[in-house]
Image (tube, rainbow, N blue to C red):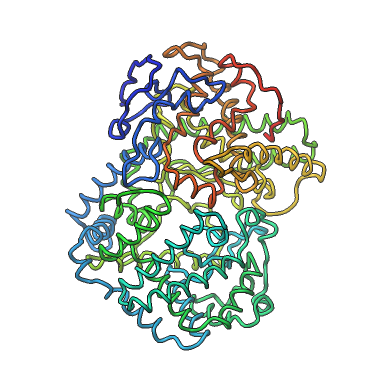
Amino acid sequence: MRTPLLVLFLSVVLPISAADAIRPVVGVDRAYMDLSASPCEDLYAYACGSFDRVPIPGDHAAWGVNQEIDERTFAILRDILDTSARTGGAKGSLAQRIGDFYASGMDEAEIEKAGLDPIKPWLEEIAALKTSEDVVKTIGRFHAAGLGAGFDFGVQVDDKNSSVMIASFRQGGLGLPERNYYLDTDKTAKDIRRAYVDHIEKILGLAGEKPADAKTLARSIFKLETRLAKASRDLVALRDPEKNYNQIDLAQLPAVAPTLPWAVFLAEVSFPASEQTVLVGQPEFFKAFAELLRSEKIVTWKGYLRWQLLSATAPHLTKAFVEENHAFYGKKLTGTTELKPRWKRILDATDAALGEDLGQLYVQRAFSPAAKARVHTMVKLHLEAMATRIKTSEWMTESSKTAALKKISTLRTKIGYPDTWRDYSTLDIGRRPHVLNVLAAARFETLRHMAKLGRPVDRNDWDMTPQTNNAYYDGTLNEMVFPAGILQPPFFDEHADDASNYGALASTIGHELTHAFDDEGRQHDWEGNLKPWWSDEDVKRFQARAELVAKHYSGYEALPGLHLDGHQTLGENIADVGGLRVAYEAFKLAAKETKPALVDGFTPDQRFFIAFAQGWRTNERPERIRLIVTSDVHSPCRFRVVGPVKHFPEFYTAFGCPPPAVKVPQVW
């Protein structure tokens, strides 16, 4: 049962505390609105203005609708974990695994007692390195254990043959969020770099390095990472799927980077002999990486691997490591002033390690069959609305329309939770130092992915856990996935009206569906393969319209002097704009038999747009906003509201606004 809507008709700013905001909420809530603001000038201020007064808790970088949903989900998950930790279960049972994992993380005394002993074998191996080949061997062992270092390596669906899995090498190995953190010359970037070097030095010191040696080594590690950053592509370049697809025969790997001992790495990750091809996303990065193996001193590489190990495990080690990790990655990068409570941090770790074990118990409490059925209906109407958009498009040729409609008709949707749950029976979890359970889970996940090589693509697999408050579209599988964790009030309520549900979920169902036809998604056909399927004329017309979207968003200033990059965020912005359009038309289909009626003084159309805006209701710290603008492909929350409605005729009609002076044609 939902908390009743407070009948608040005041146009003043209402003092709402973060604690009050945890209460279950509805899609349209007057308590969060500032009715003195004009929706025509700023829909976000009108729909969410009173929420601006809500303080951000010290352990959060942002506080808003997503955090409200998370708090309710966390309460359910905490009860599940506390019960499992207390009562346990037979060895190998679901309750035993999640109970022991959670209990090990909550046992601070055991963690302090163990110190660095659980990772001592790794530290000793690093200390014994003598050659560049030894370095690559240890990097391979890191990857096999799910730690990662130097670059990214994994297993994915082949972009150009979506029926098979393939191993993939991609740039990586950085400790800062994105390459530009190493290269930007503004004052803030320089300040973050200084703090980062200090952080490396402190972590090395906690691990026993002498102060002078820690300082020297931290600087050397940072210089090494900076060289890796210079060899990396930026976020805009990484968004081109064609340019980042380079399939190479194993025998050709030496041609990419002749001095890199590829065979040594592949042996350590137990690469199957039957696999003869791999993807190398950014060949120039690996050429530079190989050169650094040759030119950098072995002591620097040993320091780098020691730092990578300590940084990866710091959140699961002693209090000193946890606090220093938060001092940089929390306080400095996101502005949080406090650590999250320990139970939340261990809950997050349990979700990452045993997400589908935990999910089986979560969905029993939080997602009913009736809710799943209603979401299925909503998805069906979104697909119908998107098909209509394509059929009536003024800029697509008939051949491209036919192919696009085929893509919609073959698109698969997963709702709530998997049909078949993941089998964790080979994962050994026990009441032991917490970091050992974390490492065991990381290795299990790596082995699970490596086992996919040589097998057909498992289309029943999920990339998110059922309790995750998020969703995704996978272009290589042509599927949308909506976990139960995001299908919660105020985004979705099985008892709510259509205006509320369709408006609040515009940024979810409509958004993910539009990703199938954004600047990246449009390059994958109905089978998920990366290949041309549009006419050349349609591509040009699409790009011209997409460029208008990029220009529009580049005009927004997130912080003084910090503008959005419309090309970096182009795919997400297209999905935001198109998603709102598709959701609105799906809403009209759902409500076509319903007589329009005022609710709390708002028409159905007004409620749709207010619900959409309140679905992004969030207060964000400046540090978090900067982090998003500089290292994310999404726009900050406020602009995900004002951007999509800027050229939306029905929005202006709904609120009696004068239409914009310039009409910009939409992509979708």
Q: Toward which corner of the image does residue 117 lie, by quadrant?
A: bottom left
Quick one: 182 or 43, which is closer to the camera?
Answer: 182
Residue 166, by quadrant, is bottom right
Q: Is residue 329 left or right of residue 281?
A: left
Q: Is residue 330 above or below residue 544?
A: below
Q: Is residue 219 left or right of residue 327?
A: right
Q: Quadrant of the N terminus?
A: top left
Q: Quadrant of the C terminus?
A: top right
The percent coordinates of residue 428 (x first, y second) are 31, 67
Image location of residue 532, percent across then percent down = 75, 51
Relative horizontal placement of residue 516, taking residue 24 as reference (left or right): right
Coordinates of residue 612 in the picture (x, y in percent): 50, 28
Image height of 403 relative to 251, above or below = above
Instruction: Give the residue at x 60% y 30%.
Output: 582
Q: In the image as oriented, which residue stretches furthest toward the bottom?
A: 130
Give the percent coordinates (x, y) of residue 182: 54, 62
Drawn side of residue 239 relative to residue 507, left or right: right
Viewer-nearest residue: 157 or 517:
517
Q: In which image quadrant can residue 258 be found?
A: bottom right
Residue closest to the far front? 187
* Residue depicted at 52% across the width and 12% down the height: 596
Q: Residue at x 17, y 54 (%)?
A: 87
Viewer-proximal residue among 311 and 581? 311
Tally the marks.
Answer: 0
